[in-house]
């Protein structure tokens, strides 16, 4: 008989199980308070929803990462034991708890345990630089950080600050009360790019998440479904991927790869029997252009983050007419998705609508005087209803600016997105009212990057724009005026920025100017910079290039790597010392290259390894080792068999 791996935690100097420690004072003045809701909040919290499923189908599969399997009863029990440890450490209502953990079943258990203890979750990305993690944990007032031992150490966190998740089970502590949370209390704090140079924390309450995952007119997920959890836990799409299936009795299939390639996503979908998947628009366009077999396995595919290209949507629907393709839209401040639209072939002849609100969300399209605009007229989208965040942590002025009381409506969020209401009531996206941009699904405030660039002594002026916005090769571009006498290499600037900012905020293209072009009002002309070629209104603009394209001599395996790079970057690469990121590459282009190399050579190469060894020469060494391993008859055994599609049975060999 198979048994689930028990999850518990270890902490040097922690109080023994079953004992309590006085809870340190938790500052609550900085937490935004919710205005009186315009309608009753959903009656349940997330732990209560899971407890309900555990009562109804205790032995059904809840979550698996292919190695560890938990039923609903086992998930609830494991979270209860960990919640008891957290409660003994003084975690309770108002406590922020950081979570720095690889995607796994224990990450799911940890989130649920934090909620059962009454705290709220601060998701942390292992790929973030140390200063970013330190800034987030400090700003959120995190009492504790749960996570994997190696990741906690790498982040520079001390033993006193952390609690190490383990897989060595114990029954020393019994389950705590099934629900110590409050529907109006925070469940999650997601940090998004901030225009002032500081990331801002969005506090999402339990009631908002329960409305998202239980709305009857939302994306249909039922007990026979499996949803793939592959997004970064810091990306709000993970809220849907994890808690929509668990609230509805379905199963979560965890993609264990740190940064899954397109081929690894396909394999996960196939081996776990995934029926429902969420993709960013950029990744969907990539898979559609390559006619991926992933679409043939799915029943429902949700796509969001950027504008959905009609040509790609139409091609997928023609090839896979049974697929339910859903275009989703929503900011983090309104809990992941606000509107959705089920795409048909008829939609693919022009811009695809973002749809109508669902569940407890409501929308208004207003002019600058906050008056409703006529149907067919472009206006700004305001969002109201039950899925609104509580506001921005420690930012009362910003909260007051973006979350306002509207006469006859109540509390509403000013999205900054321009939309038009079509005759049938659906909404069509028409851009932004400000400089905020979307690149590969990430919401980016250029001001945050510009602020970081101006901290570098070599930089006198900086403007960040997106060139080729909405296209697969969209480039976050830093346009710089250098300090007098400065001649920095791009690697120096990029590396210094990467020490402060997450990878998605580090520009992939760099341009140096004699002077920034200005508008008639004297401000930097962002439109000119975004559409610029080699010259800007008489100012000389040169791309900072780290390597001559024709330098060096390539070995045969290096030639294979360089050719794959050249196809992705659309220019010749012949230098073994060339750096993929410095040459303008990014994570999505890297995914294309990894897929090409694996297919051309018949080996496996992870996206994480590709990005950790970003030169032609280093990647060639990795591939040579992979080829030697493939020829070794004593290599690793085949992985355990797949989870049977459509059912909730355990995979063979799983613990």
Image (spheres, rainbow, N blue to C red):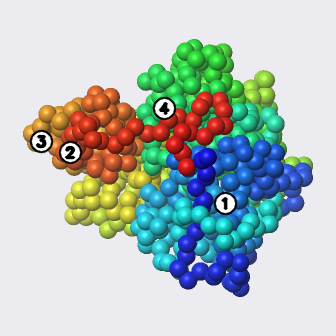
- Is residue 527 something that shows in the picture? no
CA–CA distance in space, label 3 to label 4: 37 Å
Q: Is residue 13 left or right of residue 219?
A: left
Query: Hey, which residue is sitting farthest front in the picture?
Result: 1
Check the image and report above or below for 548 versus 599: below
Pick whichever of labels 4 and 1 is earlier in the sequence: 1
Residue to which mark 4 is pinned: 266
Write down the quadrant of residue 455 in the picture.
bottom left
Pick whichever of labels 3 and 1 is earlier in the sequence: 1
- Is residue 127 something that shows in the picture? yes
Q: Helix, strand, or loop for circle 1?
A: helix
Whether label 2 touches label 1, CB < 8 Å = no
Residue under the point 44% across and 39% down: 639
Residue under the point 58% across and 17% down: 320
Residue to which mark 2 is pinned: 621
Q: Nearer the viewer, residue 470 or 653?
A: 653
Pick whichever of labels 2 and 1 is earlier in the sequence: 1
Q: Helix, strand, or loop for circle 3?
A: loop
Q: Which mark is residue 551?
A: 3
Residue 548: percent from left, percent from top: 16, 43
Q: Helix, strand, or loop for circle 2?
A: helix
Residue to which mark 1 is pinned: 78
């Amino acid at each position: 008989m198979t048994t689930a791996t028990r999850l518990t935690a270890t902490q040097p100097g922690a109080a023994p199980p079953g004992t309590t420690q006085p809870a340190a004072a938790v500052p609550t003045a900085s937490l935004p308070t919710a205005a009186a809701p315009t309608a009753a909040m959903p009656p349940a919290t997330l732990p209560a929803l899971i407890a309900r499923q555990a009562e109804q189908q205790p032995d059904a599969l809840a979550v698996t990462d292919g190695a560890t399997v938990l039923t609903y009863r086992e998930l609830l029990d494991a979270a209860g034991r960990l919640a008891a440890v957290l409660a003994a450490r003084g975690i309770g209502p108002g406590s922020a708890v950081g979570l720095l953990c690889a995607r796994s079943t224990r990450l799911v258990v940890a989130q649920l345990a934090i909620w059962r203890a009454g705290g709220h979750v601060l998701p942390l990305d292992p790929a973030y630089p140390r200063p970013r993690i330190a800034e987030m944990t400090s700003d959120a007032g995190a009492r504790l950080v749960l996570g994997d031992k190696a990741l906690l150490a790498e982040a520079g966190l001390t033993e006193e600050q952390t609690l190490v998740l383990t897989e060595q089970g114990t029954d020393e502590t019994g389950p705590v009360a099934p629900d110590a949370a409050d529907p109006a209390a925070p469940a999650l704090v997601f940090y998004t790019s901030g225009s002032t140079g500081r990331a801002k924390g969005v506090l999402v309450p339990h009631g908002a998440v329960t409305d998202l995952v239980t709305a009857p007119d939302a994306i249909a997920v039922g007990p026979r479904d499996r949803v793939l959890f592959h997004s970064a836990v810091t990306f709000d799409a993970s809220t849907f991927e994890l808690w929509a299936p668990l609230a509805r009795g379905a199963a979560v299939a965890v993609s264990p790869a740190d940064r899954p390639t397109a081929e690894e996503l396909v394999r996960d979908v196939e081996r776990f029997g995934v029926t429902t998947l969420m993709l960013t628009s950029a990744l969907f366009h990539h898979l559609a252009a390559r006619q991926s077999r992933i679409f043939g396995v799915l029943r429902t595919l949700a796509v969001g983050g950027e504008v959905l290209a009609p040509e790609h949507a139409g091609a997928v629907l023609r090839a896979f007419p049974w697929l339910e393709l859903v275009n989703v839209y929503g900011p983090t401040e309104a809990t992941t998705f606000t509107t959705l639209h089920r795409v048909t072939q008829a939609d693919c002849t022009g811009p695809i609508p973002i749809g109508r609100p669902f569940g407890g969300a409501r929308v208004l399209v207003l002019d600058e005087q906050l008056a409703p605009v006529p149907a067919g007229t472009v206006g700004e989208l305001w969002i109201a209803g039950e899925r609104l965040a509580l506001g921005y942590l420690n930012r009362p002025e910003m909260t007051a600016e973006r979350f306002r009381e509207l006469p006859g409506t109540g509390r509403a969020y000013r999205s900054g997105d321009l939309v038009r209401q079509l005759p049938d009531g659906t909404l069509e996206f028409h851009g932004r009212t400000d400089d905020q941009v979307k690149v590969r699904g990430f919401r980016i405030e250029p001001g945050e990057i510009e602020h970081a660039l101006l901290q570098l002594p070599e930089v006198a002026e900086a403007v960040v724009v997106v060139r080729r916005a909405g296209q697969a090769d969209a480039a976050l571009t830093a346009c710089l005026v250098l300090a007098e006498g400065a001649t920095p290499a791009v690697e120096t600037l990029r590396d210094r920025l990467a020490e402060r900012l997450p990878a998605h905020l580090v520009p992939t293209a760099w341009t140096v100017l004699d002077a920034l072009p200005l508008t008639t009002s004297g401000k930097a002309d962002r439109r000119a910079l975004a559409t610029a070629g080699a010259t800007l209104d008489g100012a000389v603009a040169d791309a900072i290039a780290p390597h001559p394209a024709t330098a060096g001599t390539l070995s045969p395996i290096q030639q294979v790597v360089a050719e794959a790079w050249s196809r992705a970057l659309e220019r010749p690469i012949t230098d073994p010392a060339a750096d993929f990121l410095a040459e303008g590459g990014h994570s999505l282009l890297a995914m294309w290259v990894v897929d090409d190399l694996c297919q051309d050579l018949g080996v496996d190469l992870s996206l994480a390894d590709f990005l950790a060894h970003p030169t032609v020469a280093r990647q060639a060494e990795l591939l040579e080792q992979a080829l030697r391993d493939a020829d070794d008859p004593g290599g690793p055994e085949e992985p355990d068999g797949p989870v049977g599609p459509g059912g909730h049975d355990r995979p063979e060999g799983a613990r």
